[in-house]
Amino acid sequence: MDLGIKLKRHWVDGKNMGLVTRQRSLLAHLRRSLETSGHFNGESLRDDVRKIKKYSIQNIEKITNEAVKNLKKAGWNVYLAENGESAVNFALDFLSDAEKIVKSKSNAVKEIGLVEALVREGKEVIETDLGDRIVQILGEKPLHPLAPAIHISKERIAEVISREVGFRVRPDVEEIVRSYSKWLLKFILESDASITGANAISAREGAVGLIENEGNISLITRLVRKHLVVSYTSKIVPTLSDALKVIQATSIFGAGQPAGTYISFISGPSKTADIEGEIVNGMHGAEDVAVILIKTPEIPEELHEVFCCLNCGICLSVCPVYYSSDHMITGKGYGGIGVARSFVYGEENEDIWRCTGCRACGEVCPVRIDSGKLINFIRRSYERENDKG
Ligand code: SF4
């Protein structure tokens, strides 16, 4: 795919190493993703994924009802939440008997404040994605959806991981990874419940699709007795093959890989019927599984594309504001799409006025979302409000 994008190394203050590291990774991410997309028919995949996501959002009520019915049929405990607060209440109830909880990356979990609510109940909640765990221990804001610790040096990470594992880890990337992985496996085996998000949910099959490279999602959804999925109704698509397309686009544009290292579709609890045909839940994987589907708010049709985002993060590599500053990082996402999303959820964000209107994001987005156009619509609605006031 030739998008005519000129990759230029921005001049940065030599002292600001966090920003330099982040910019290097963003450029590498962009190059990798565009190259992979060129090899794997990225343009027709983009057309297909846009069609799937647009159809799903336009028919959200219908496919949500179908998903709820088929998820239940597959053995999931399903809760359709009106808002984040009711989702948290359901989760607290479902996880009431869990003391140690392991979780993987999930925007929905972050946005509804579920980890904080669980911690207030006295539970220990550990992020299992390495980058997320680093920022969790440091109490910092993740700076990228797929690479949350993108701005932190290996020297600082080695200190953090040394504290975690209880012995000195050298600032050597491989040593850091090995030490954390050993420590984490032990913690996972002692855990009572796991929490994940969903990259896509298929309505017809009642299956939750997840993609990952680290293997942490596979471990926590197999080795731990209870599994809770927290997601939005906007993640539902009609069929398993639609979900797979969404997942492949996420992988190509998000990580520059034709397929993530692990792709899982989970449809219900693990089970066996090997003895006299009697079904027993909980063979090797989770035996008690639940899905929370948080309803997406009703918004003007002009903003519907906000809910089509796959959260792949490629638009961040071309956003001049995000790329060269610490702006365009909101509680509801990153870049232009994150700013638009925060508006949809009723949050005031002055970054709405920082967008340069370059529209580069729409050029690279796997769903062809033009975040600049969404931002223009929001700006006009603010201006209309001001005119009235
Ligand atoms: S707006 Fe598009 S490019 Fe940006 S994160 Fe969402 S899907 Fe990816």
Image (cartoon, rainbow, N blue to C red):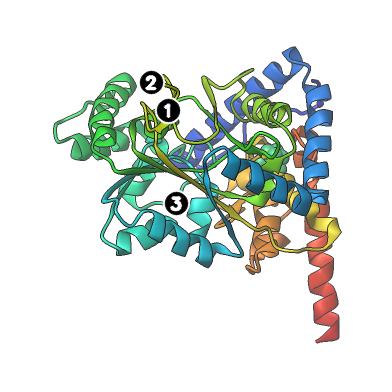
Q: Position of residue 371 (x, y in %)?
A: 77, 49
Report the residue at 75% width, 40% height from top: 361
Residue occupied by mark 3: 141
Tell me which numbered mark, 2 or 3, is placed earlier along the sequence: 3
Report if the CB atoms under discs 2 and 1 are less than 8 Å apart: yes
How many neighbours does mark 3 have within 10 angstroms: few (below 14), some (14-19), or many (20 or more)?
A: some
Q: Does residue 357 appear in this view?
A: no
Q: Position of residue 227 (x, y in %)?
A: 42, 42
Bin the neighbour count of mark 1 within 10 Å (Cα to Cα): few under 14, some 14-19, many 20 and up: few
Q: Secondary structure at mark 2?
A: loop
Q: Is residue 290 left or right of residue 328?
A: left
Crowd band around label 2 with a 10 angstrom C-alpha radius: few (<14), some (14–19), many (20+): few
Amino acid type, label 3: Lys
- The reply to whether the C-beta atoms of the residues labelled 1 and 3 are less than 8 Å apart is no
Which quadrant of the structure image shows residue 310? Answer: top right
Quarter of the image with the C terminus is bottom right
